[in-house]
Amino acid sequence: MDKDFDLLVKKYLKEGNDINIIQETFDKMITKNSKNLSTKKTKKNRKRICRPVLLISDSSCDEFETI
C-alpha cells in the first residue's frame, strides 16, 4: 500500500501539483469514503418487563408503630 501512495504522490508532483493540494485532496477522499462505510446504529427495543409481586401483610408492623 505504501508503494501505491508513493507512486501516486510522485506522479502528481511530476505533473506540477503542490504537496498541499495533494494532501487536501487525499483528506477529502478519506472523509468521503469513511462516511460511506459507517453503519447506522440500531436501537434495541427495550420493553419494560412487568413481573407480578407478592405482597405479604405482616401484622407485627402495627405493633412497632405504636412504640
Image (cartoon, rainbow, N blue to C red):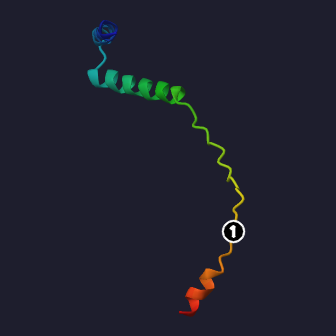
- Give the x, y percent position of residue 32: 48, 27
Q: Which amino acid does label 1 sit on?
A: Leu
Quadrant of the rendering where the N terminus is positioned: top left
Q: Residues within 10 Å of mark 1 (few under 14, many from 20)?
A: few
In this picture, is 20 found above or below 12?
Answer: below
Q: For residue 29, which quarter of the picture?
A: top left
Is residue 6 shown left or right of residue 53?
Answer: left
Left or right, 44 with reference to 26? right
User: Which quarter of the picture shows residue 50?
Assistant: bottom right
Q: Does residue 61 appear to the left or right of 21 in the view shown?
A: right
Query: Residue 66: horizontal and vertical position, in percent?
Result: 57, 93
Q: Residue at x 28, y 20 (%)?
A: 18
**Residue at position x 68%, y 70% in the image:** 56
**Number of numbered markers:** 1
Which residue: 72% across, 59% down?
Answer: 52
Q: Give the image location of residue 7, x and y in percent.
A: 31, 6
In the rendered image, the vertical position of residue 32 relative to residue 56, given as above or below: above
In this view, 51 is above or below 58: above
Residue situated in front as seen by the camera: 34 or 55 = 55
Q: Mark 1 points at which residue?
A: 55
Q: Is residue 47 left or right of residue 32?
A: right
Q: Residue 23: percent from the left, percent from the top?
A: 32, 24
Q: Is mark 1 on a helix, strand or loop?
A: loop
Q: Which residue is at 70% across, 64% downward?
A: 54
* Near-viewer residue (21 or 4): 4
